[in-house]
Image (cartoon, rainbow, N blue to C red):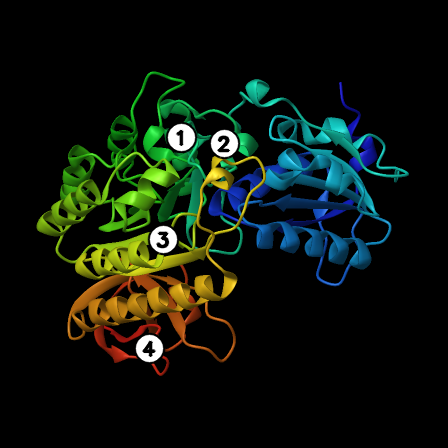
Amino acid sequence: MIDTTVFQDKTAVYYTLGCKLNFSETSTLGKTLREAGVRTARKGERADICVINTCSVTKMADKKCRQAIHRMVKQHPEAFVVVTGCYAQLKPEDLAKIEGVDVILGAEQKKDLLRYLGDLQKKNGGEAFTSALKDIRSFVPSCSRGDRTRFFLKVQDGCDYYCSYCTIPFARGKSRNGTIASIVQQARDAAAEGGKEIVLTGVNIGDFGKSTNETFFDLIRALDGIEDIQRYRISSIEPDLLTDEIIAFVAQSRRFMPHFHIPLQSGSDEVLKLMRRKYGTALFASKIRTIKELMPDAFIGVDVIVGTRGETAERFERACQFIASTDVTRLHVFSYSERPGTQALNIDHIVSEEEKHERSQRLLQLSEQKTETFYARHIGKTMKALMEKAKPETPMYGFTENYIRVETNPDQTLDNQIVTLQLNGFNEDKTALWGTIIS
């Protein structure tokens, strides 16, 4: 039994790096502390506990994590500092050497946060608690809102794909998930808190159901039946797991939005094989065509990695040509980063940092063109958008069903409300369309 009296009237701050899944999990850690009597520290207030949830997808992510830890220790010098997340699982010994860090919790340990806080007395050096990869088995539910309008609902964790460039399976463990019944209840709870839109998150959400003998298609059908949630969005889903059945369901659903995020990673079949991806460009292209046939105005975001080992200039050119030929909306471009222990380190042909930068810029320019063309097609249309709270002296913004960012004159009464707008044209920097509210 944990003595929670030590936590009464204590304060905590939280810092999250990385993906939406991490933000969702930090929210759960915060809830655990609040239920034990810990309140969130006010702005400028020195906290008793610091929780830092890390990412380790690239070398730059590792660097940002270390910088964040040093910053938090400096801002809260007397705080008991807890570091968790992917970096904590992969490199606990590195984090234990950072001055001010008290506890490092791996993927299996973070669910038992309170047990590792002890009496909140600072330690002389960090103590790490992690499990071997085979022992990472728990699925910890989480659903976050924070200061956003949308809720992020974790439906799955871990990955069994072991792509040659990726360390996530080593940090997160095998694919696993909660039951459909438990996730539906979390969605109902979000609705009771006033939630109108939920984003389904995970590491490889299309793999949902391995640990419960259910399927992702079963899950979205169940969630679609919750009357009080008006919008769902599916976060990143692998092209080989995005079935035609799922696409057809989204096309006829009133609640699942015409918005997909599909990782391509490379438009070169040779590079995809080196990456150990489970599809080729032909399958990817067929998925895009199917989406556009059923939902011509669907927003399609795509992840692309440039400069991986084996990506010769010729292969990159073919990749660019393929991506340019597909009817996608926006590219999320990442530069390849060497990750210790990955199979990619055995691949010949290393791309220089300068070339990685040039390739990134080319794809980012292509992305801007595609997004601007997509937005322009919607000027003059009437669409519904879920509005978000505006910062002082800035336009209010929201997102349409198909994820077009719209801006309008601020009206705080419209926060978390779905309104109908006439889309009139681009804002000044072409990052949104300006809308006139009709109703």
Amino acid, disc 4: Lys
Amino acid, disc 2: Pro
- Quadrant including the C terminus: bottom left
- Circle 1 SS class: loop
Amino acid, disc 1: Tyr
Q: From the top left corner, tell me how far across and down residue 437 is, in percent.
A: 26, 73
Q: Which residue is mark 1?
A: 161
Front residue of this view, candidates 231 and 287: 287
Q: From the top left corner, tell me how far across and down residue 404 is, in percent.
A: 28, 64
**Which of disc 2 and disc 4 is earlier in sequence?**
2
Instruction: Verify CB contact (< 8 Å) between mark 1 and mark 3.
Output: no
Q: Residue furthest left?
A: 293
Q: From the top left corner, tell me how far across and down residue 29 is, in percent.
A: 62, 38
Amino acid, disc 3: Val
Q: What residue lies at 16% left-to-right and 58% top-to-bottom?
A: 297
Instruction: Verify CB contact (< 8 Å) between mark 4 and mark 1.
Output: no
Q: Which residue is mark 4?
A: 430
Distance (Cα) linking label 1 and label 3: 17 Å
Q: From the viewer's perspective, tell me whether residue 75 is left or right of residue 43.
A: right
Instruction: Verify CB contact (< 8 Å) between mark 2 and mark 1.
Output: yes
Q: Which residue is mark 3?
A: 304
Q: Report crowding for label 1: few under 14, some 14 to 19, many 20 or more residues within 10 A (C-alpha).
A: some
Q: From the top left corner, tell me how far across and down residue 290 is, in percent.
A: 12, 45
Distance (Cα) linking label 3 and label 4: 23 Å
Q: Residue furthest top?
A: 213
Q: Which mark is nearer the camera, 4 or 1?
A: 1
Q: From the viewer's perspective, tell me whether residue 371 is left or right of residue 379.
A: right
Q: Which mark is residue 169?
A: 2
Seen in the picture, residue 97 relative to 212 is either above or below; the reply is below
